[in-house]
């Protein structure tokens, strides 16, 4: 059996949790540009966080090449 690369899966799950709008920060926020830990969200912040997620994920997986081998 071959080895399985868990790097993209682990990075995706951790980033999904950390970049959820309103958990650590919300960009853009209701009253300011950035608010921290407010647990609210909006359509615009979901879009901004999705673009951030895609950019950071692409950099980590393709440019840096994070790999976690198992098996």
Image: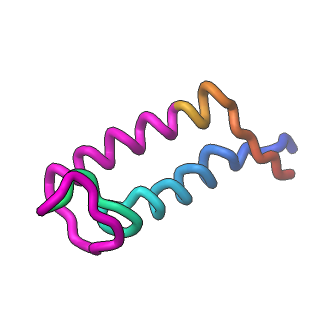
Q: Which quarter of the figure has residue 30?
A: bottom left
Residue 47 location (% of width, % of height): 23, 46
Q: Is residue 2 left or right of residue 56?
A: right
Residue 41 magenta = yes
Residue 7 location (% of width, % of height): 68, 46
Front residue of 24/16: it is: 24
| Quadrant of the rendering where the N terminus is positioned | top right
- The span picked out in magenta is 31-58
Residue 35 location (% of width, % of height): 28, 63
Q: Is residue 22 above or below residue 13?
A: below
- Residue in the picture at 86% in, 51% down: 71
Front residue of 5/16: it is: 16
- Residue in the picture at 46% in, 63% down: 17
Furthest residue to the front?
32
- Residue in the picture at 82% in, 51% down: 70
Front residue of 24/70: it is: 24
Q: Is residue 5 left or right of residue 15?
A: right
- Residue in the picture at 21% in, 52% down: 33
Q: Is residue 34 left or right of residue 61?
A: left
């Amino acid at each position: 059996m071959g080895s399985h690369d868990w790097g993209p899966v682990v990075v995706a799950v951790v980033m999904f949790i950390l970049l959820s709008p309103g958990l650590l920060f919300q960009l853009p926020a209701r009253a300011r540009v950035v608010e921290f830990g407010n647990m609210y969200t909006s359509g615009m912040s979901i879009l901004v966080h999705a673009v951030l997620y895609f950019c950071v994920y692409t950099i980590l997986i393709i440019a840096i090449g994070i790999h976690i081998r198992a098996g």
